[in-house]
Amino acid sequence: MNRQNDTYKTIAEPCVGTYKEKGSKFLAYAFPIKDAAEAKQHVQQLKKEHFDARHHSYAYRIGLHGEQWRANDDGEPSSTAGKPILGQLLSSDLTNVLVVVVRYFGGIQLGVPGLIHAYRSATADALSHAQIIIETETEYLTFTFPYEALNSIMKLLKEEECDVISQKFDTECILKIAVPKSKTAAWQQRLEKLSGVLVR
C-alpha cells in the first residue's frame, strides 16, 4: 500500500485475542502506544493482573517506520515468543503498537514449533479484532505576526493541510499549528516569506 512518507498504520484502541493448545492458554493484548515507557507500564500492569501466569512475552514497534522495537521471550525458549509476536506486527505493517501475550501453562510441553505457532496465532487473533487506522506524523510550528498579516496567514492555512493547536489574536498574534513532518521545512519557508512573521 502506497502511503505518504509521514503516515503510518497503527491501531485505534486496545484489543484482545486468544489461542489454546494442549491445555495451555495464550491471551494476547494489543495496545496503541507512543513510547517505550508506555509499553513498560502496560507490561507491568498485565503482570499484576495475571500474576499467576507462567509467561508475559511481548513485542513492540515504535516510530514512523517502526525503527524502535523490542521482542521479549520472558523465559520461553529463545525466539519462540517475542519474535513471532513481532513478526505479526511486521507482516501487518503496524507501528506504535505493543502486543503482550500472557501464557497459562497447561502441563504439556508444546516444543519450539508449537510455541512459535501459538504466540503467532494469539497475536494474529488480537490484531484481527483491531481497528487499523492511518496516522500522520506531525510537527508543531509556533509563530508570531502582526495583526495586519492575519488575512494572509488565514489564506495560507486554508490552502494547506494543518491543524491549529492554539491561537491568540492581539496587537501581536501567536499561532501554533501541527503540520505533516514532511512539509515542515516548506511551511517554515512560506511563513518566513510573509512580512512580519517570526517562526519561533
Image (tube, rainbow, N blue to C red):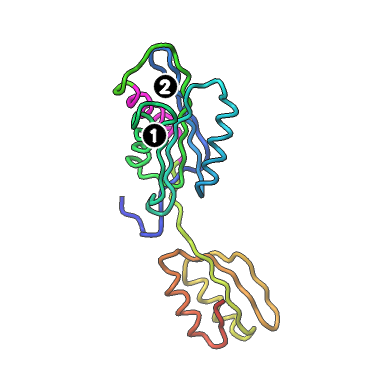
Look at the magenta stretch and give its main secondary structure. helix
Type of amino acid at the residue the image marks with label 2 = Tyr
Residue situated in front as seen by the camera: 105 or 117: 105
- Membership of 128 in magenta stretch: yes
Residue carrying label 2: 19
Q: How many residues crowd around disc 1 within 10 Å: few (fewer than 14), some, or many (20 or more)?
A: many
Height in image: 105 above or below 80?
Answer: above
Type of amino acid at the residue the image marks with label 1 = Gly
Q: Position of residue 76 (x, y in %)?
A: 40, 26
Residue drawn 34% across the image and 17% down it: 110
Q: Position of residue 85 (x, y in %)?
A: 38, 34
- Membership of 19 in magenta stretch: no
Q: Which residues are magenta?
A: 115-131
Q: Position of residue 28 (x, y in %)?
A: 46, 29
Query: Label 1 near label 2: C-beta < 8 Å?
Result: no
Height in image: 70 above or below 187?
Answer: above
Residue carrying label 1: 82
| View extreme (left): residue | 113
Q: Position of residue 142 (x, y in %)?
A: 57, 72
